[in-house]
Each structure stands twice: as structure tokens, then as C-alpha cells.
């Protein structure tokens, strides 16, 4: 029950600039399982691995994908460790994730031309990092069906 583990490490991208924490939803017991040292994206939230931060809110952070697949390619992830969409149970957290994706698309200048939001889930979904994330892709025309 170490408070330092509740919302990721102090000083990382997971911290709000004003030092405030979300107390609205994070008192939910499941929300206490917040960080795994073994998880790449938890380490980004905690600040142990650097990332190019684009935006954040109480529940989620957004940073640039290391291997962009489009002129604009941003990942939006929950601050808490949630392995995939299949494990997600918190509606407020999922809502905050989607709203941050839309905010990122606006700030990237994609709202007029359009963009794609993707949540690769599980093996057949092509998920390689097992911490829930939304890909926000834009700046070029996307194809359908996806590969
Ligand atoms: P997925 O295949 O849907 O699980 O997506 C994982 C994404 O994470 C890929 O697009 C990777 O390029 C991206 N990625 C992996 N490591 C990093 C990192 N350290 N910083 C930013 N993006 C990363
Ligand atoms: Zn994680």
C-alpha cells in the first residue's frame, strides 16, 4: 500500500504538473494496482523511460510512437496498468482515454482531414505492448480493410 506506487513514480509523466492526483475514481480498489516495473508503458508513465509527451489528463497520457506509421502517430495510454481493452473495466478511465485521443487529434491538426484511432488487442489484434493503448494516426489517407 505504498502511496508512491499508487499513481506511478513522482516526477514522471504520470504526475500532473500541479502535483494533484485524481481522487475521484482512483479510490476504487482495483485502481490500486497501478504500475508494473516489467511493463514498458508503466515505465514511461513513471518517467523511467523517456517519451515525447503530447498531452495528458487525470487518467491518461499521450506520447509519440517511437516507430511512426503515419506523419502523425501518437499513443494514448491509461496511467494505471491495464493489460488491454479486454481487461478494461473502468468507464471513466476509458472515456478519458478516448477524449484525450480526440484532443490529441485536434492539437495535431487532424480534426478537419480525419484520422484513425486503433486499439490492437491480443494476439490476433497484433498487440505487442501489453498495456492498453490507443494509436492516433493521421496526416495521410488510411486504408480499409486494415492489414
Ligand atoms: P501495439 O503493436 O499495438 O502493441 O503497439 C505498440 C506500439 O508501441 C508500437 O507502435 C511501437 O512502435 C510503440 N513503442 C514501442 N516502444 C516504444 C517507446 N519506448 N516509445 C514510444 N513508442 C513505443
Ligand atoms: Zn503497464
Image (cartoon, rainbow, N blue to C red):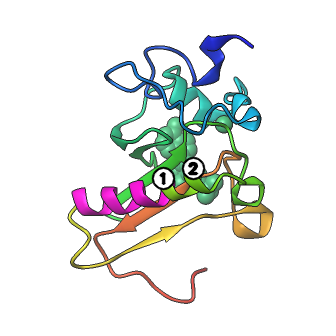
Ligand 2 neighbours mark 1 (CB distance < 8 Å)? no
- For the question of whether residue 131 can be seen, the reply is yes
Q: Quadrant of residue 41?
A: top right
Image point (60%, 12%), residue name:
4
Q: Which residue was labeled with disc 2?
A: 93
Residue 20 in the image, given as x and y percentages of width and height: 41, 22
Nearest to the observer: residue 41 or residue 31: 31
Q: Position of residue 63 (x, y in %)?
A: 40, 43
State the residue at coordinates (66%, 45%): 131
What percent of the width, then of the height, locates residue 117? 47, 69
Q: Is residue 124 magenta?
A: no
Please say whether residue 104 is one of the residues in the magenta stretch.
yes
Q: Which mark is residue 96?
A: 1
**Secondary structure type for disc 1:** helix
Residues packed near mark 1 inside 10 Å, few (<14), some (14 to 19) or many (20 plus) = many
Left or right: residue 68 versus residue 24 is: left
Magenta segment boundaries in residue numbering:
97-107
Amino acid at each position: 500500500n505504498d502511496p508512491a506506487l499508487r499513481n506511478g513514480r513522482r516526477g514522471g509523466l504520470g504526475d500532473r504538473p500541479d502535483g494533484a492526483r485524481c481522487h475521484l475514481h482512483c479510490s476504487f480498489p482495483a485502481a490500486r494496482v497501478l504500475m508494473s516495473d516489467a511493463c514498458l508503458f508503466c515505465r514511461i508513465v513513471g518517467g523511467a523511460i523517456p517519451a515525447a509527451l503530447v498531452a495528458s489528463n487525470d487518467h491518461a497520457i499521450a506520447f509519440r510512437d517511437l516507430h511512426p506509421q503515419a506523419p502523425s502517430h501518437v499513443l494514448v495510454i491509461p496511467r494505471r496498468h491495464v493489460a488491454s481493452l479486454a481487461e478494461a473495466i473502468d468507464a471513466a478511465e476509458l472515456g478519458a482515454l478516448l477524449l484525450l485521443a480526440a484532443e490529441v487529434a485536434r492539437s495535431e491538426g487532424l480534426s478537419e482531414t480525419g484520422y484513425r484511432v486503433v486499439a490492437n488487442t491480443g494476439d490476433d489484434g497484433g498487440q505487442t505492448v501489453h498495456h492498453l493503448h490507443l494509436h492516433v494516426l493521421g496526416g495521410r489517407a488510411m486504408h480499409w480493410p486494415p492489414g
